[in-house]
Image (cartoon, helix red, strand yellow):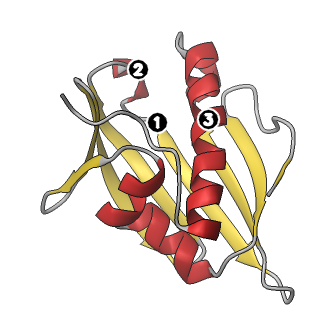
Amino acid sequence: MTDTALVGTDADFTRTLTIDATPAALRAAITTDEGVSGWWSPTVSRGPELLSVSFGNIGVDLRVVARPELVVWDVVSCSAEPDWVGTTIEFASAADAAGTIELVFTHRGLAALPCAETCFAGWTHYLPSLVSYVESGVGNPGPRRS
């Protein structure tokens, strides 16, 4: 995994990562319950319109919009960080001939929020977990709901 420094606008948190895996493996990790539970939170459920993720007593509801090289999570609710509502989490990817993927992860609007420092630390933990999960099938997701 290669991870570049923080880039993007003053309002966004962005990381660029290189992943040794197929586009299908990355897509499954960010669009399926099993995938998301493997690297972000083991407590994931899906309703007709929303992906719900829990970290202990903290819940996040996301509307997932998936296109071939861009997956967007629109944050609909977040019990711990209500300011997340209305932000978007984007996974833009491109595969190269060598069989690696460049992933540009952006949480739009995050840097302008009061939780920025704590949330940056969270994503700095979970993005390597995503890469590990996509490359090896083993991630480091957050705690289970009690």
Q: Residue at x 41, y 63 (%)?
A: 35
- Residue 128: x and y, percent? 66, 47
Residue at 81% across, 35% down: 6
| Mark sitting earlier along the chain (3/2) | 2
Nearer the camera: disc 1 or disc 3: 3
Provide residue 126's location: percent of width, then percent of height.
57, 41
Q: Amino acid at mark 3?
A: His
**Vertical position of residue 140 compared to residue 138: above or below:** above
Q: What distance separates the C-alpha of mark 3 from that of mark 2?
A: 20 Å
Residue 74 left/right relative to 139: left
* Residue topped by disc 1: 87
Disc 3 on helix, strand or loop? helix
Query: What's the amino acid at mark 2?
Result: Asp
Q: Are marks 3 and 2 in contact (CB under 8 Å)?
A: no
Residue 116 in picture, x, y percent from top left: 60, 18
- Residue 4, given in percent of the width and then of the height, sits at 86, 45
Quadrant of the frame with the N terminus: bottom right
Local crowd size for mark 3, using a 10 Å CA cut-off: few (<14), some (14–19), many (≥20): some
User: Toward which corner of the image does residue 122 lie, by quadrant?
Assistant: top right
Q: Quadrant of residue 125?
A: top right
Is 16 situated above or below 9? below
Q: Secondary structure at mark 2?
A: helix
Q: Secondary structure at mark 1?
A: loop
Quadrant showing the C terminus: top left
Q: Between 22 and 7, which is closer to the camera in this rendering?
A: 22
In this picture, residue 131 sits left or right of residue 37? right
List the residue tagged with mark 3.
Answer: 125
- Left or right side of 17 for 54: left
65 in relation to 20, above or below: above
User: Badge 2 is on which residue?
Assistant: 83
Disc 1 or 3, which lies upstream in sequence? 1
